[in-house]
Image (cartoon, rainbow, N blue to C red):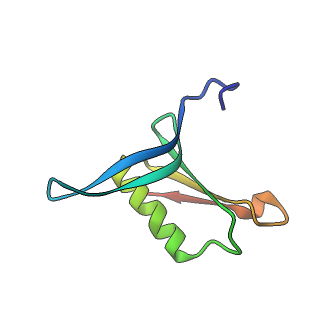
Amino acid sequence: MRCAGLLFEEEKSVSVRYRGEVVCSQRIDLFVDNRVVLEIKSVDAIHPVHIAQTVSYLRITSARVELIINFNVALLKHGIRRVVL
């Protein structure tokens, strides 16, 4: 991504607020160009809990697109899931 000139942050810590109070913080694997969230996994399959996690990341960052990339597959294109709000 650096070679392509993309701005990104690794392990970005984001505060979760509820009614104006910080209740916890979450770490986002990669936040690219302040627009796309990348969640890196190595699991047997992408489950609904992974989708719920990514939706929460999208809500707290105001990003609209997230890619879940699961590296535990035979062919990488089968391990990519796009989530859009």
Q: Give me the residue at 63% from left, 23% from top.
A: 5
Name the one closer to the observer, 83 or 70: 70
Looking at the rendered image, the quarter that the C terminus falls into is bottom left
Q: Most extreme residue toward the right, as rendered?
A: 74
Based on the displayed image, in which of its 4 quarters is residue 71 positioned? Answer: bottom right
Q: Give me the residue at 68% from left, 70% from top.
A: 43
Say above or below: 9 vs 52: above
Q: How many marks?
A: 0
Give the image location of residue 56, x and y in percent.
Answer: 39, 61
Name the one closer to the observer, 8 or 25: 25
63 left or right of 72?
Answer: left
14 left or right of 65?
Answer: left
64 left or right of 24?
Answer: right
Give the image location of residue 80, x and y in percent.
Answer: 68, 59
Looking at the rendered image, the quarter that the N terminus falls into is top right
Q: Give me the residue at 85% from left, 66% from top.
A: 74
Give the image location of residue 30, x and y in percent.
Answer: 55, 45
Say above or below: 14 vs 84: above
